[in-house]
Image (tube, rainbow, N blue to C red):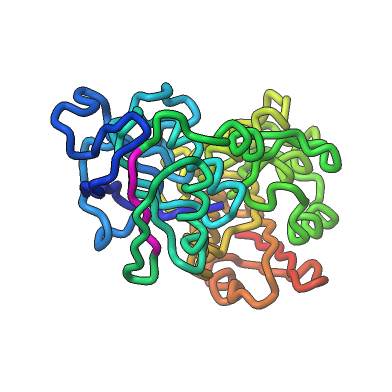
Amino acid sequence: MLGKAAGIGYRERSTGMAGDDGLNAGDEGLNEGLRHGVYGTPPDALCAVAPEAIQFSPLLPGSSALEAQAPGSLASLVMLAPPATIERRYAIALGLRALAPGAPFTILAPRDRGGARLAAELEAFGCAVHDEARRHHRICTGLRPARPVGIEDALREGAPRFIEALGLWSQPGVFSWDRIDPGSALLIQHLPALSGRGADFGGGTGVLSQAILASPKVTKLSLYEIDRRAIEAAKRNIEDARIDPRWADLRQPDATLAKLDFVVMNPPFHDGGAEDKTLGQSFIRRAAESLRNGGQLWLTANRHLPYEAVLKPLFKHVTVVAEASGYKIFEARK
């Protein structure tokens, strides 16, 4: 659901390797006038920063979509590759399509989150790569070949799709992309008919929002989600004039979040692949700030997460409504 909101980077490095067209990364005038690109938040210690680079991460609200970038229009690309295989190959294929022939790329990932496979995956796309190990990352550099191999297959495999079993649009890389999260399923079982104006925090592809909108007394529902791909899927999944999907980071200020009647959430607790309990806690605090007096929060969470200590000082009444399969459902009234 959630990614790091950090700066962009561009790793300036001449590999000394030639692409299929014989161009080198250091050739004078190569791709002059084209833009640099960056995908994700590469560590500053591994990448120099280029302020003019276009950010393409779907997890950084306001970023450009790499899917929409014209083929051959980037002079270079640095990418912190996603950890999941299908998502990673899709992002790399998008990057290779957007790069101009002979343009340099730097693609890196933590060794234990896809980095160990990077070189082989790039070679399968027809790239000659230099593979370097540094600071628990694998860093692959090279030049975009004149004719990459197999990128169309990777683009098809990672593209948005309709999941028949769910009756929903989704995409690899989105949280719980091909199944209903068990915590969300438990919350839906216990969610009452809500009313008034509310929000779905971290709403993903719209599973909880669909359940909320089943109540005719709901007048407006804002779905907040940091993943652009999930927001685009939610727009296809929910055809209801009351829904307002917002690609946003809830950790950032939002003056429109005020005097809500209810908030529903299945908050994230991972950031960049690592567990981060403070994410859910920040969602709870934002809910408390956004609700009117007497407003209610409905929350599902893994049993081990320490949310009670955050809920009790912020809400007058906190009740554990259900507990099953390692999850808890909380109702909290402000």
Whether 231 is drawn above or below 186: the answer is: above
Which residue shows up at 64% across the image and 54% down it? 265
Q: Is residue 39 left or right of residue 125?
A: left
Say which quarter of the image contains residue 214.
Answer: top right
Q: Nearer the viewer, residue 158 or 40?
A: 158
Q: Main secondary structure of the magenta part?
A: strand
Residue extending furthest toward the left: 28
Q: Is residue 58 left or right of residue 308?
A: left
Q: Is residue 141 magenta?
A: yes
Whether 23 is drawn above or below 130: the answer is: above
Which residue shows up at 19% across the image and 25% down it? 32
Q: Nearer the viewer, residue 216 or 123?
A: 123
Whether 70 is drawn above or below 52: the answer is: above
Whether 272 is drawn above or below 320: the answer is: above
Image position, residue 56 (x, y; %) = 41, 38
Image position, residue 330 (x, y; %) = 71, 65
Image position, residue 204 (x, y; %) = 63, 45
Q: Is residue 192 left or right of residue 21?
A: right
Q: How many marks?
A: 0
Q: Is residue 119 magenta?
A: no
Image position, residue 167 (x, y; %) = 82, 36
Q: Nearer the viewer, residue 25 or 195?
A: 25
Which residue shows up at 51% across the image and 54% down it? 120
Q: Which residues are magenta?
A: 138-143
Q: Is residue 167 left or right of residue 101?
A: right
Residue 138 seen in render:
yes
Residue 259 seen in render:
no
